[in-house]
Structures are given as C-alpha cells and as structure tokens.
Amino acid sequence: MESTRQIALAYQQSGDLPQAQAQLDELDVANAGQWLIFVTEQSISQGSPANVLEALVRLVYDLNLYSAQISRYAEDQGLPHRGVSLVNQVADAVNPPAQPGEQGSSPAEPPTQSPPEPSPTPAMAQETPTETPEPTPEPPTPTPEPVVEEPALHATDPMNVRAGPGTEYPVVNTMSAGESAAILGRNPAGDWWQVELDDASIGWVYGPLVETSGPVDQVAVAASIPTPPPATPTPPPQPTATPVPAGPDFRLVEQRLWSVEENGGFLAGESVNCGGGQVLRVIVKDAAGNPLNGVTVQGVYRNELHTTGEKGPGIAEFDVNVDGDDIVVLRDVDGREVTSDRAKGNTAKTYNIPFSQLIQGRYCKDDASCQAFVDTNGCFGHFSWTVVFQRSY
C-alpha cells in the first residue's frame, strides 16, 4: 500500500498521468485500478494524513475510476469531482491568463490629441451656446446572492422510509432508486436521517444505504424522535396433533456467485476487469419449479424485507453492501409464517468467498491464482449472488 501512496504523492507533484499509470501497472496486483480504489478506501477508513488522501483521491479521479465511498469523502473535503483535470488546474495556477497591460497583451493606444479650439468670430460670439445634458448613470448591476446548498440524500436502490430511526418502527413510505429527499435531522448515533420527501411527508431512512450531499456534518439531532413501539410478544406455541413435516417449508436449492461477465466486467488475458454489480438476487419457486410471487423474504442482519415479484416473476433483490447478508423465506403468499433454509455467506469481501465460487465465476483458475486474487483484494466490494428457494409442498 505504501508504494501506491508514494505513486499518488509523486503524481500530485509532477502531474504526469501516463507515468503514474505505468507505475501502477508495474505493481504486483491483479487489477491496478481496483487496487488503487482499495488502497484509497482503506486510507480513508484508517484516517491517513490529509495530503496523502488528497493525492490518492485526485489520482483516482484523473484515471476515471469510481467509488461511492471515495466520492463521499471528496465531496465532504471539497476536493475536485470527476471530469475536472487536476493537471489543467495546476497549469492554470502556474500560468494565469495575462491581465490587460501585462507583457503579452495588446499595448494601449496612445491618446489622440484634440486640435486647438478656433478663436471665436463675431458671428460665433453672438450664438447662444447649447448645454449638453448630463448622461443618466446606469443603475448598478445587482450582485447575485450565493446559492446555499442544503443537506440532502439520494437513494441508489429502492428502500423503506420508517416512522422512526430503527427497523422496529413501522414502514410509512418508500423511496425509489434515483429519488432524492431533503435532510431535516439525524438520530444521536448518526446512522439514521430524518427526511422530507417530495410529497412533504416526513420519515426516517438508514444512512449507510444512501448517498448524501451538502453540509451534512452540520445537521443537528432531530428535536423530536418518536418513542420506539413496544415489542410484539411472541405467542406461546399451541399444541397440535398434526405431525411436523420433515425439513423446512422452503429449501435452498441453489446459491452461486455471478461470473465476471454477469457482474458487468470482462477478462483481458490473465487480468480481471471487475464489474460494478452489488446485487443479491433471490428467486422463489413452488414445488413444481414455477416462479412464486408474493412471498416475503428477509435479510437477516439488516432486517430488510422484500416481496418476490418486485423485480420479475418470483424475483426479489437486495444490495450486497460489501458485508452482504444471510437470506431466509419469512412468509408464504397467504401471509403465513414459514420455516426456511438460510442462505449464508452472500458477501462482497474477496477473502470470505470460497475458491470454488471464485473459480466458477471465472475470477481465477486454480487454488494458486485464487490465493493471489484474494491477497490483492481483487474486485473487493463488487460481487453479486443468486440464491434460489423452492417450496416443499
């Protein structure tokens, strides 16, 4: 990592982007661009010195790479955004445009001397001079008021809006992918935002699932936070004479990692160009293998609920979010709670993915190449999964 930081610091001084790219390509990593993103994200998380972070972020943007975490950090720190060439900024700072009158600008025209006024003749002396009216001064151009950016957030995926800051509160609204909302406040822990939606309704959304903009560090704790609702007591099990069926109601019949190409990437010889997908797709089928809509599936750790049919026949989708989530079937189409296998290990952390899954997804070919891929955190944070459940009755 230290050699990567030194490359970024050297580029900040020289502005030589091809040289920085060549130095990154010489590193013993599977994907130089993905490695640079990983080092930058780790440096942000570890609180590295500001000059090192600025150099890493600028090199990421000038190489046209992207990371949501890096974008948020750059915006919070007031660093340049994608599309602005830092080399051009340095050039403008070193060679500012010439000002009028400086060397290189057109020389000022010498003043033209007026001819001497003629002596008045008797006829001229008898004429009454005409007074020239004073010009009316132009009104001053008003200075536009500076635009003050308000704190806001942006939903990258469909998500729930709750009555309070926690999953124990009921869902009162939803946000679609691409929808924005104004931020009104936060909870004391700082992981939930109080928002106002376009229809003027108020609710709360989970902070790690959205992108923010504006001075969010100035957002105060909300003045009024609803009291969490009381937990619903679980009724004691009722005795029944019906024999318990063998096995769960819904069985896990498939769990696989998406291939490089499925996830939006491609292979170039021995190199893997990672895609940008972070999808956890859940498919539920009936006993005959037909898609089953209206089944409620749950992300165990984040307590996120989705219903099959939202993303296609029998399909629901979650965001992997690096750590991923375990998935179970919670309720059948009639709302009855069911038993289910648990799909575990749907993660985007390279070192937590079995070699067999990496080989099947074409990220590596054997144990040796998979170990090298894991050691360099290849495609870290950019993996997708599919899990399939089938009803047993």
Image (spheres, helix red, strand yellow):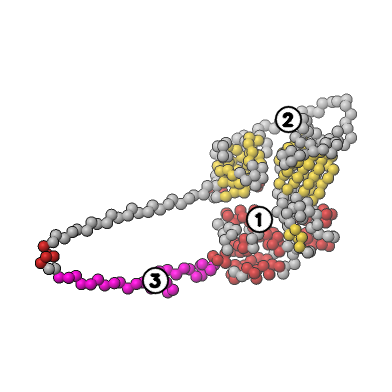
Expressed as whole percent of the image width and height from the top left, the position of residue 305 reads 72, 39
Q: Which mark is residue 233?
A: 2
**According to the image, label 1 marks what residue?**
67
Residue at image location 82% in from the left, 26% down from the top: 238
Instruction: Please tell me whether mark 2 or mark 3 is closer to you in this view.
Output: 3
Residue at image location 52% in from the left, 47% down from the top: 150
Pointer 2 and pointer 3: residues touching (CB < 8 Å)? no
Residue type at numbered disc 3: Gly
**According to the image, label 3 marks what residue?**
101
> Quadrant location of residue 341?
top right
Q: Is residue 328 visible?
A: no
Q: Residue furthest front?
A: 123
Residue type at numbered disc 2: Pro
Residue type at numbered disc 1: Ser
Q: Main secondary structure of the magenta part?
A: loop
Residue at image location 58% in from the left, 39% down from the top: 197
| Residue 276 included in the magenta stretch of the image | no
Q: Quadrant of the N terminus?
A: bottom right
Disc 1 to disc 3, how far (Cα)? 46 Å
Q: Residues within 10 Å of mark 2 (few under 14, many from 20)?
A: few
Question: Secondary structure under badge 1?
Answer: loop
Which range is magenta? Answer: 90-119
Q: Is residue 317 above or below residue 335?
A: below
Disc 2 to disc 3, how far (Cα)? 83 Å
